[in-house]
Image: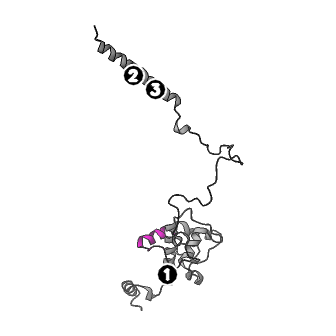
Amino acid sequence: MKSNRSISWNRNRAVLGVLATLLVLAATGCRQDMHDQPRFEPLERSSFFEDRKAGRMQVVGTVARGELNEDAHLHTGFVGDDLATTFPFAMTREDLARGRQRFDIMCSPCHGRVGHGDGIVVQRGFRAPPSYHSERLRGVPPGHFFDVVTNGFGAMGDFSDRLSVEDRWRVAAYIRVLQLSQAATMGDLPGDVKSEFQDAMGGAR
């Protein structure tokens, strides 16, 4: 014969089991999945706004996280009201190599690999861009090239959606390299390079 203590324990365990089952059923009945929370689906009609559109434009002045762009020199190519005459960060050999890669992919189809404006697109009948080696473009500050790549100019569209801010500056730096390569004098060469060049030219000075 079972003791009263055993009977009481079994009864309490049964009651607890029933209560637990009821709590689970209640939670399930009141449950609202997060994916089913009140919200508008894309292109869904809204009765709240006058134009009945659920999709709304961003509030004017909204800035996405990490895109405040406080450095005007870096992000606009201007210092004050003037085009930047300097680069916003030091250009290393790696930066120039990256600038060359981006230039060859994005720019050379029109501008040519050396910048004379004779790229493959031009050879097929499209409008030729000006040569980077013209007196006018040799005299513009690097901020000009950054601004043109960012915003476009004339027949050229902007490349801001295809080149990062830093890569636009690297392309501008590589354009300067191309200009120097076509207009450098013997005096512009470092001593060791000058000696090597002179040896190759048979001792020409």
Answer with mark 3 or mark 2, whichever residue precedes in sequence: 2
Q: CA distance from mark 2 to mark 1?
A: 86 Å
Viewer-side label of 1, 3? 3
* Kind of residue at disc 2: Leu
Which quadrant would residue 10 be assigned to in this image?
top left
Q: Residues within 10 Å of mark 1 (few under 14, many from 20)?
A: some
Q: CA distance from mark 1 to mark 3?
A: 79 Å
Q: Secondary structure at mark 3?
A: helix
Q: Secondary structure at mark 1?
A: helix
Viewer-side label of 2, 1? 2
- From the viewer's perspective, tell me whether residue 168 is left or right of residue 12: right
Quarter holding the C terminus is bottom left
Residue 163: in magenta span:
no
* Kind of residue at disc 3: Leu
Q: Residue at 46% across / 26% down in the picture?
A: 23
* Residue 119 visible (yes or no): no
Q: Which residue is mark 1?
A: 180
> Residue 147, position in %: x, y?
58, 72
Start-end of magenta stretch = 84-104
Tell me, for residue 23, which label it has, or none: 3
Relative depth, front residue between 138 and 51:
51
Q: Which residue is mark 2?
A: 16
* Kind of residue at disc 1: Leu
Answer with mark 1 or mark 3, whichever residue precedes in sequence: 3
